[in-house]
Amino acid sequence: SPNTGEEIQGGEKLLLGCLSTADGSVLWQRTLAEGNAYWRKHNNTSPSPVTDGERVLAITGTGMIRAFDMDGEELWHYDLQAEHGPFGLMWGYASSPLLYDGKLFVEVLHGMNTDDPSYLIAFDAATGEVAWWQERPTDAPGESPDAYTTPVILEYDGQTQIVVSGGDYLTGHDPATGEEVWRAGGLNPGKERNYRVVGSPVAVAGMVYATSRRNPVLAFRAGGTGDISESHLAWKWTGAGGPDVPSAVTDGRYFYMVDDRGRATCLDAKTGAVVWGPERTAQGTVSASLVLADGKLYVVNENAVTTVLQAGPEYKVLATNELDGGYTLSSLAIAGGRIFLRTESHLYCIGQ
């Protein structure tokens, strides 16, 4: 049973809190920014913070980035909107940052309510110095330039790239300079005006996977330069049960996804062939991303009900767990053999 610990209340302040994993007590909390805003399913604290164990970095929907040491002392801050202009997304900014090899990578993919370009920006994580700024062009129409995804790392053949999905394209970038190495289209084949992307890309074992607005789901082989839309396309999936909001996961052998209605599907990660699904999980809408850990898949719906599935070629429900019946859009975090689940009213630590 959970120890509910202490309460954090921010009101219009956007807060970052550090809690003890032992008992949930609040070790420190800091104000990131002020002035909340609400959209249908998120607010200005939707982006997740990141840490490398030496510092923790967070960004808000207002565009304020702040870095702290592990004791909560501020190291630096940077205001994206003050430096690069207002965000122009229809549903507000919600992309989480990527922390890798001493740099913090941030994407701003927008266009519905602005003529300013989409861009990527990298910072020295220790000092906040801007390492580079890179425009990311798109010809996506209407709302389709907008994306709420998070960049991911692709490692293959001794190379490393930053992979970004949104604005009708999947792109790979040199982490040292931000320069675009390759680009793949096909996420919005009909060039529809409302194909904003929410689910983040996945990069494992020399493959890159991208979901769109339910379908298609695309998989590309790593290693190309320029336009790789056709040359490196491994497979394309257009079946029922594709995700809109939840991000997918893969172990390199199987590719797993869950749609917003809670239907789970498993594809062969190399060929795109259906292994099983779509199969129902606990009734309810799913916005949280799938989590794969210890041979298990965790599907959390908006009623805070978690369906635990066995990973692999057979669909098997291992458990269905309900907590306080509260509302949640958050994805699970797993560390130190424990599961952390946030609802609108509580943060739970689950373990033995």
Image: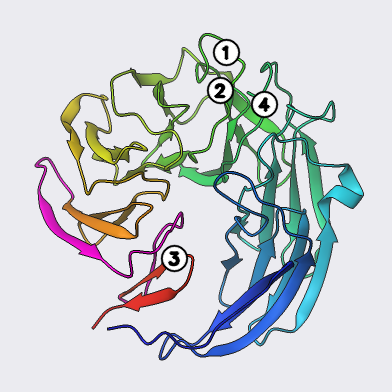
If you read the primary sequence from the N terminus, does the residue marked by circle 4 or circle 1 appear first? 4
Secondary structure of the residue carrying tag 4 is loop
Q: How is the image coloured?
A: rainbow
If you read the primary sequence from the N terminus, does the residue marked by circle 3 or circle 4 appear first? 4
- Residue type at mark 4 is Pro
Which residue appears at 69% of the width and 70% of the height? Answer: 11
- Say if mark 1 contacts mark 2, CB within 8 Å: yes
Q: Residue 101, percent across and down?
A: 61, 60
- Say if mark 4 contacts mark 1, CB within 8 Å: no
- Residue type at mark 2 is Tyr
Number of numbered discs on residues:
4
Q: Residue 329, percent across and down?
A: 46, 54
Work out which quarter of the rendered image holds the C terminus and state it. bottom left
**Dot 2 crowding, Cα within 10 Å, few <14, some 14–19, many 20+:** many
- Residue type at mark 3 is Thr
According to the picture, the residue beneath numbered tag 1 turns out to be 192
If you read the primary sequence from the N terminus, does the residue marked by circle 4 or circle 2 appear first? 4
Work out how far the residue at label 4 is from the one at label 1, CA to CA, in angstroms.
11 Å
